[in-house]
Amino acid sequence: MLATTLQALVSGLAIGGVYALIALSFSITFTTTRTLNFAQGEFIGVGAFLGVTVLYALSSGGEGGSFAALAPAASEGFRYPAAALAVGAALGTLGLLLFLAAIRPFAGKPGMSWVMSTIGFGIILQSLGLAVWGPAPVNMPSPFGDDVLRLGGAGVRPQEVAVLVVAVLLMAGLDFVMRRTRLGKAMRAVAYDPNVAALMGINVTAIMLGAFALSSALAGVGGVLVAPIASASLFMGMGIALKAFSGAILGGLDNPRGCIFGGFALGLLESGVALWQAQWREIAVFLLIILVLAIRPNGLFGRRALDKV
Amino acid sequence: MSPMLEVQGACIGYGPIEAVSDVSIRVETGQVVAIVGANGAGKTTLMKAVAGLLPLSAGRVLFEGRDITAMPPHRRVGAGIALSPEGRQVFPDQSVRDNLELGAWSRDLSPCAMEAAIEAQYALFPRLRERQGQMAVTLSGGEQQMLAIARALMGEPRLLLLDEPSLGLAPLVIKEIFGIIRALRARGITVLLVEQMANLALGVADQAYVLETGRVTLSGSGAALLQHPQVRAAYLGAGH
């Protein structure tokens, strides 16, 4: 009993870490631009496939195996971190494109055109991905192998621990940047009010571009992190993004720390309920979200009303 | 010599509604110029346009002889214009010190120069030094107003725009704020001031304009307008 509980705890924390990371990515664009990237799920899937592609390119000619079945050696050494960095950079650039094409023309204007334009951007991206990589899921080996770690009787996959550690490090780093650095303070100024930030001499458009680049990079890295646990698929991101978004709403979309909390809470709840009855997992999660929102419409730690959307 | 600021025939609107129609004002270097008028007369709209937050539908804005009508707001700070906005708008979840640092964003100061710039503000507003580590949201209204002015001064403007600095403040605090406006003029900073408290604004102003429903209806020296029967009747109240 203890062993299975511990196991659920670790996998809950691991998937919760990914939810928290993506929830934070939603919060970053929402606070600075009052818009969200509804293609975030597709960005995760594309990030995972790009990661597989980079690993394949780095290990081809050697012991890496074929694209559809990468051997464990393909993720060894510097290759996995290099793939994560490359995907972060590539998706960050894609985020700039998304902002210019799908957000900038519509942000701050009445109506919700940006909702449709980001969804459309995601569908286009996914279709392009299908054309390039095909619909079949692809295996991405974990850099730490697949040997199960024994932890107080519980079997834990090393990638789960890695996901948790990397997600926590990334979030701690971002929290530090937002609170302590000049750039972070400027981002928070834009989050408070873009016009007032402009009065300080802050180039608000540049900050918004940066927010979308950062948010999209996080989605890509999230895809690379989670792919070795499941497998890389262009459809894998939808569920993750939806849960992450729910976590963000639960914690309060305008509060980055609240979003992190919401993401972890959802991951833990999900794996906790699955321990008991797997088919009740989604029901319990979404019932809880509806209940919380009924009592606190801005989320547990949200401050501002969301009606500015 | 060209004036520090010249607004020529400005029309400013929100969609189809024109809030300011064909307004022209001049602000000479070293002066305090006041714009007085009732709530909704278009004073704040005009200030926002000078700061670059609202576009002009007609007319132009010249700063030190240079046409800045199309210049984006963040570049106007670097050019030498800073606005302390209506309602103070300090960043509530950031410390007093961080608010001040953000005010100097466009100057790219070294840590040492930043320290000196902040010290200069603390010398002018000693209360801010006592509160430097506190979140701006915890300050009183008067302290927030001082922070908003200090934050604008951190950009080292040649032209300081003050939008309703007395709004919602106690009489003693208002007196203090107007003392600071006089001190700033003595330092050679040009001030464009928007106020509903017409008597105070006209008392400090070298030049003044009366704005009514988006149009300039009167202008002249502060002292002259203070005596003007129309101004006395409309803004200073009978028996004031």
Image (spheres, rainbow, N blue to C red):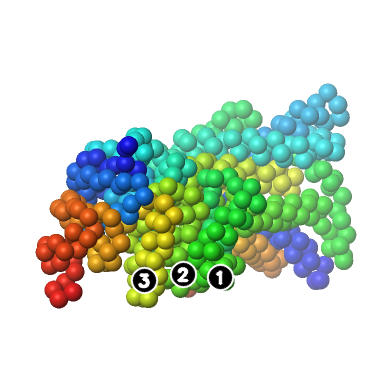
For the question of whether residue A113 can be seen, the reply is no
Residue furthest top as drawn: A61
Q: Which mark is residue B143?
A: 2
The numbered dot on residue B100 is none
Check disc 1 and report its element: helix, strand or loop. Answer: loop
Give the residue displayed 79% in from the left and 55% down from the top: A161
**Residue A168, percent from left and from top:** 72, 56
Neighbourhood count class around disc 2 (C-alpha, 10 Å): few under 14, some 14–19, many 20 upward: many
- Can you say whether A260 is above or below A35 in the image? below
Report the chain holding disc 1.
B
The reply to whether label 3 and label 2 mark residues of one chain is yes
A184 lies above or below A123: below
| Image quadrant containing the N terminus of chain A | bottom right
Left or right of A103, for residue B68: left
Q: Is residue A239 above or below residue A132?
A: below
Residue B129 as seen in the image, left or right of residue B4? right
Q: Tell me which chain the residue with mark 3 is part of.
A: B
Q: Nearer the viewer, residue B66 or A205?
A: B66
Residue B49 in the image: x percent, y percent? Answer: 32, 46
- CB contact under 8 Å: marks 1 and 2: yes
Residue under label 1? B131
Q: Name the residue carrying label 3.
A: B175
Q: Chain of mark 2?
A: B
Kindly report the distance in space between the C-alpha atoms of the residues bearing marks 3 and 2.
13 Å
Please check whether the numbered discs 3 and 1 fall on a single chain: yes
> Which amino acid type corresponds to the residue marked 1 in the rendered image?
Arg
- Spot occupied by residue A224 in the image (x, y as percentages of width and height): 70, 43
Q: Secondary structure at mark 3?
A: helix
Q: Position of residue B209 (x, y in %)?
A: 22, 54
